[in-house]
Image (cartoon, grey):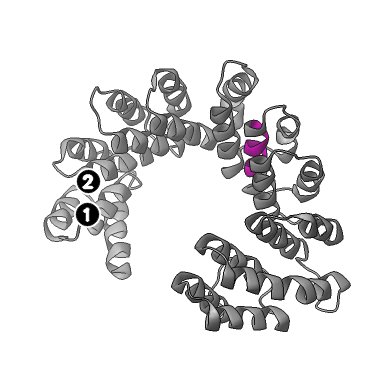
């Protein structure tokens, strides 16, 4: 199937009108036809726009959505304008309107940002608003800075909407880590959570130390969980401070998330490092116990925490215990996968 998908995309990008028609007539699996339509937008051929527009009225929603992605990929302002108008149709299925919002976010069309900005105040359904924010977060920040700073600074904007915006900005590396600093100090825990989760998905910079400082002053339980989740992805740089915090946590899930943050903070350290040895001595057996005795979610998180340090003998012993003794089959399977070296979450040196 992978070979056939690659062929469909190649026909879309390098073929012409006749090849597209022939391929769509013979490629029966839906996934192949959708992949072809989507790739036609990257062909650079003048006839791609008209060809794709015809599929906006196709009887299959998947084909209509693939045509949307293809039209956004042409980079033509006229195609983006058409999509913006199509998105605003009364009664359009939410799956299709959100597809447009996301596709315009990644489009090369010069008017894509303005179309998203125009659509945002008119949107009523939560799903579309969320996707418009994601689309806007993909655009050059110079084009969206006034919008995001305005909505984040507006007291009338709902805190959960601000949270979504901050998460979106981090997801697409639209801003640098310092952008989040004022929101880490917000009086509203929802906004602080958004800043933590935005920093969590940021791929540039080194936000871990900033997150650790914020965590030490965080008192809201839910915001604290968000901060710990972020520190499970972004190394704090101070495993001993993180270890003290983890040992003070009482609730099983919070304790597991904190232990995961400890594991992440050990990134790049040698096996003989005192903090690494301490993790194997203290946290490997405890995470094993929490996985075996806890809920499904606790077990999966515990395995994920252990997988970060899976080259450690103590951690591998802990994973082996989970694989052998845990009654939850999903947790058991996750442990087995980590032992086999297939757990992608692991970044242990």
**Residue 219 picture quarter:** top right
Give the left or right position of residue 163, taking residue 269 as reference: left
344 or 36, which lies in front? Answer: 344
Instruction: Name the spot of residue 9 as percent of width and height, x first.
Output: 31, 57
Badge count: 2
Residue at point 43% right, 37% down? Answer: 107
> Any mark on residue 84, and which?
none
Residue at point 84% right, 69% down? Answer: 275
Q: Is residue 324 magenta?
A: no
Instruction: Name the spot of residue 13 as percent of width and height, x first.
Output: 32, 52
Residue under circle 1? 33
Give the left or right position of residue 6, taking residue 286 as reference: left
- Res 268 seen here: yes
Residue at point 81% right, 40% down? Answer: 217
Q: Secondary structure at mark 2?
A: helix
> In 3D space, how far apart are the residues under numbered discs 2 and 1 (Cα atoms)?
8 Å
| Callout 1 crowding tier (Cα within 10 Å): few <14, some 14–19, many ≥20 | many
157 or 7, which lies in front? Answer: 157
| Callout 2 crowding tier (Cα within 10 Å): few <14, some 14–19, many ≥20 | many
Highlighted range, magenta? 191-198
Name above or below for residue 263 compared with residue 52: below
> Any mark on residue 63, and which?
2
Instruction: Name the spot of residue 246 as percent of width and height, x first.
Output: 76, 58
Instruction: Name the spot of residue 328 as percent of width and height, x first.
Output: 47, 72
305 or 100, which lies in front? Answer: 305
Residue at point 28% right, 45% down? Answer: 66
Q: Quadrant of the C terminus?
A: bottom right
């Amino acid at each position: 199937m992978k070979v056939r998908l690659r062929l469909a995309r190649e026909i879309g990008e390098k073929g012409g009108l006749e090849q597209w028609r022939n391929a769509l007539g013979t490629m029966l699996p839906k996934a192949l036809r959708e992949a072809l339509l989507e790739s036609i937008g990257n062909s650079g051929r003048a006839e791609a726009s008209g060809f794709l527009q015809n599929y906006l009225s196709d009887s299959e929603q998947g084909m209509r959505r693939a045509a949307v992605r293809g039209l956004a990929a042409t980079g033509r302002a006229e195609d983006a304008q058409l999509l913006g108008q199509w998105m605003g149709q009364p009664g359009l299925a939410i799956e299709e309107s959100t597809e447009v919002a996301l596709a315009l976010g990644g489009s090369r069309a010069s008017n894509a940002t303005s179309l998203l900005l125009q659509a945002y105040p008119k949107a009523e359904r939560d799903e579309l608003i969320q996707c418009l924010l994601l689309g806007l977060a993909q655009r050059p920040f110079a084009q969206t800075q006034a919008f995001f700073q305005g909505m984040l600074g507006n007291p009338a904007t709902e805190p959960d909407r601000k949270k979504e915006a901050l998460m979106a900005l981090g997801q697409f590396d639209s801003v640098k880590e310092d952008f989040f600093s004022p929101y880490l100090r917000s009086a509203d825990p929802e906004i602080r959570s958004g800043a933590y989760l935005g920093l969590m998905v940021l791929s540039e910079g080194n936000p871990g130390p900033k997150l650790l400082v914020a965590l030490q002053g965080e008192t809201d339980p839910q915001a604290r969980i968000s901060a710990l989740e972020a520190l499970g992805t972004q190394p704090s740089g101070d495993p001993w401070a993180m270890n003290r915090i983890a040992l003070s946590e009482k609730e099983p899930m919070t304790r597991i998330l904190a232990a995961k943050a400890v594991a992440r903070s050990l990134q790049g350290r040698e096996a003989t490092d005192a903090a690494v040895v301490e993790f194997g001595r203290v946290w490997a057996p405890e995470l094993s116990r929490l996985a075996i005795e806890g809920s499904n979610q606790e077990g999966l998180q515990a395995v994920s925490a252990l997988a970060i340090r899976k080259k450690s003998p103590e951690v591998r012993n802990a994973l082996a215990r989970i694989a052998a003794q845990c009654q939850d089959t999903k947790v058991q399977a996750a442990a087995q996968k980590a032992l086999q070296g297939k757990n992608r979450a692991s970044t242990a040196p």
